[in-house]
Image (tube, grey):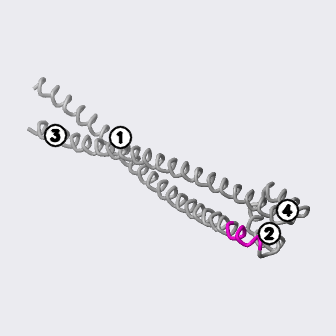
Amino acid sequence: VETNQRRIAALTNGINRLSASSERWTAEREQLSKEIAGAEAAKGVAAAEHEKQRDSFKTEETRLLSLVDEIVEAHKKIAEVPASSLISTLQEKVAVKSNRSWKNSQAFLQREPKPEGVEAVLDGLQTDVAANLGTLRSKETQRVQSFQSMMKDKNAEMKAMQEQKQDKTEAIADAAQKVSDNKVVIAN
């Protein structure tokens, strides 16, 4: 009888430990579920922001490419159209991203409105716009790479949390089975 009482006490202690562990694992599993949901939401926000930035890049890239095309067209019209007309046509578009080169070009043209002067200004503007386009594309490439890296890291983090959650689920099931087995032994 004494041996059986000690065995029952040991099994009861085991049941209590397993029950406490199961409760802790359940709470940890629920916390992991919340963290996974938070990570999913963060990915959604990041993807939306990525799309917004991509659209902004595409708009600016299109604007700069259009400006290059207009500068090339202006080169073709130098002999036909007065310099002031060509420059005023481009002025609004270039002024959107006002820069030192444009301001210097305006001052130069006021002194030198000859076709050679206009060509020099247009060449300078085209160089500036091409440089801005190159910088813009480089930054976009870096931003896309950073986004992809962040998403890869977030996916790995989420996978690890899913695996932990699965481990907790299995541990809870094992604990429930052991509790059930211990209760059967105690009942007999």
The residue tagged 1 is 24
Residue picked out by circle 2? 87
Q: CA distance from mark 3 to mark 2?
A: 92 Å
Q: Note whether 110 is above or below 182 in the view shown.
A: below
Question: Of the residues under marks 4 and 3, which one precedes in the sequence?
Answer: 4
Residue at label 4?
A: 106
From the image, which quarter does the C terminus lie in? Answer: top left
Q: Specify which label sits upstream in the sequence, 3 or 2.
A: 2
Q: Are marks 3 and 2 in contact (CB under 8 Å)?
A: no
In the rendered image, the residue lying farthest to the right is: 111
Q: Amino acid at mark 1?
A: Arg
Q: Which residues are magenta?
A: 72-79
Most prominent secondary structure in the magenta stretch? helix
Helix, strand or loop for disc 1:
helix
The answer to whether 46 is drawn above or below residue 78 in the figure is: above
Give the residue at mark 3.
183
Element at badge 4?
helix
Quote the CA–CA distance across marks 2 and 1: 74 Å
